[in-house]
């Protein structure tokens, strides 16, 4: 893998070692912690949860900026580049995603939380009205927010861009699915949020001549993972992931995917421990011309339970572009 850091190889190996035929045992919330859905109503509760998620997300990104240079071996210039990109990313996410979580994540199910037609131009057309998910972990006694995680309405994941192809993001700076894991870091690239996945391919459209690749099963995208510094190493991150997987499974969705940066080593370890495995890696500098930092954009996915086609994950050798 060209220009990948030593952390890339170590994380990929750890993730591969954690790939098993059955998902890990679900994790219950640790003592003193309650995991609950984002409150859509009443409006005061929704506003309080919005403020809590925003604060958790901002704190998480501050941790990413502070910790990534140490974990990823970034020099001062690369660290400054990443910090500036994360700052722009945070403002875009807060304004374009977190300020209206019920609608953006379609927490009300078909029609969205506000009753809008999910097939309208303002709603995701690929989800056919499927709902998304958002959870908070709070202190069971004080109610203090400890962490959060979102799940976009299930859809068929897109394939990651190839090296040399524009990875997207405003001015090519990256952004999109940033996940602050239990160790306090995790990020991905806007326009490259999904793990590698193949749509149906028939003869003349790529793949082996005369062969057809079945459509990929629906998958929920894990996003906006954040854990408060005071709550780390208490199992909050794993409990949030379990809550997301359990809710998706109740809707018949048995796969999950995410994307992150390889320099976000603690988050990568959290995802690998939860059962996610690396399915593709792309050199950051080759995807984003203005992000001249070492490491890779990493796509991960997992089968979260039986019944959703999760057992037929394709081999990665033809998809990692390395």
Image (cartoon, rainbow, N blue to C red):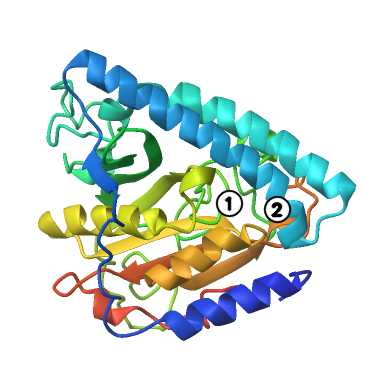
Which one is in front, 157 or 257? 257
User: Residue at 32% of width from left, 21% of height from top?
Assistant: 48
Residue 163: quarter of image: bottom right
Q: Quadrant of the N terminus?
A: bottom right
Residue identifier under label 2: 68
Q: Of the numbered discs in the image, which one, if any, rests on residue 185?
A: 1
Q: Earlier in the sequence, mark 2 or mark 1?
A: 2
Residue 169: x percent and y percent?
60, 38
* Quadrant in which residue 296 is drawn: bottom right
Q: CA distance from mark 2 to mark 1?
A: 7 Å
Q: Are marks 2 and 1 in contact (CB under 8 Å)?
A: yes
Q: Position of residue 182 (x, y in %)?
A: 48, 55
Q: Residues within 10 Å of mark 1 (few under 14, many from 20)?
A: many
Residue at position x 64%, y 38% in the image: 62
Horizontal side of residue 313 vs 167, given as left or right: left
Which residue is found at the position 32% from the left and 61% from the top? 256
Q: How many neighbours does mark 2 have within 10 angstroms: few (below 14), some (14-19), or many (20 or more)?
A: many
Q: Give whichever of 33, 223 is nearer the camera.
A: 33
Q: Secondary structure at mark 1?
A: loop
Identify the residue at the far right of this view. Answer: 76
The residue shown at (43%, 78%) is 207
Q: Secondary structure at mark 2?
A: helix
Q: Is residue 308 left or right of residue 213?
A: left
């Amino acid at each position: 893998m060209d220009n990948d850091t030593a952390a890339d190889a170590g994380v990929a190996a750890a993730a591969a070692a954690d790939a098993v035929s059955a998902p890990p045992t679900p994790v219950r919330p640790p003592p003193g912690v309650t995991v609950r859905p984002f409150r859509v109503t009443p409006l005061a509760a929704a506003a309080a949860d919005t403020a809590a998620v925003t604060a958790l997300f901002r704190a998480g990104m501050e941790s990413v900026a502070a910790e990534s240079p140490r974990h990823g071996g970034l020099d001062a210039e690369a660290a400054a580049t990443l910090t500036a990109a994360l700052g722009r990313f945070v403002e875009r996410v807060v304004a374009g995603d977190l300020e209206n979580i019920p609608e953006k994540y379609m927490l009300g199910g078909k029609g969205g939380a506000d009753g809008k037609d999910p097939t309208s131009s303002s709603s995701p057309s690929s989800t056919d009205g499927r709902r998304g998910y958002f959870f908070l972990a709070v202190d069971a006694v004080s109610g203090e927010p400890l962490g959060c995680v979102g799940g976009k309405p299930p859809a068929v994941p897109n394939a990651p861009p190839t090296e040399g192809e524009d990875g997207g993001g405003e001015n090519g700076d990256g952004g999109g699915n940033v996940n602050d894991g239990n160790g306090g870091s995790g990020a991905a690239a806007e326009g490259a949020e999904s793990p590698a996945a193949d749509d149906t391919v028939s003869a003349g459209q790529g793949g082996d001549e005369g062969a057809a690749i079945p459509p990929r099963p629906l998958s929920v995208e894990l996003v906006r993972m954040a854990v408060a510094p005071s709550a780390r190493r208490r199992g909050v991150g794993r409990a949030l992931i379990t809550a997301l997987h359990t809710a998706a499974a109740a809707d018949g969705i048995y796969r999950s995917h995410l994307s992150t940066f390889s320099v976000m080593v603690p988050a990568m370890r959290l995802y690998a421990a939860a059962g996610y495995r690396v399915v593709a890696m792309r050199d950051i500098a080759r995807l984003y011309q203005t992000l001249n930092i070492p490491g890779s954009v990493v796509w991960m996915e997992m089968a979260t339970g039986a019944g959703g086609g999760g057992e037929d994950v394709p081999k990665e050798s033809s998809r990692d572009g390395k």
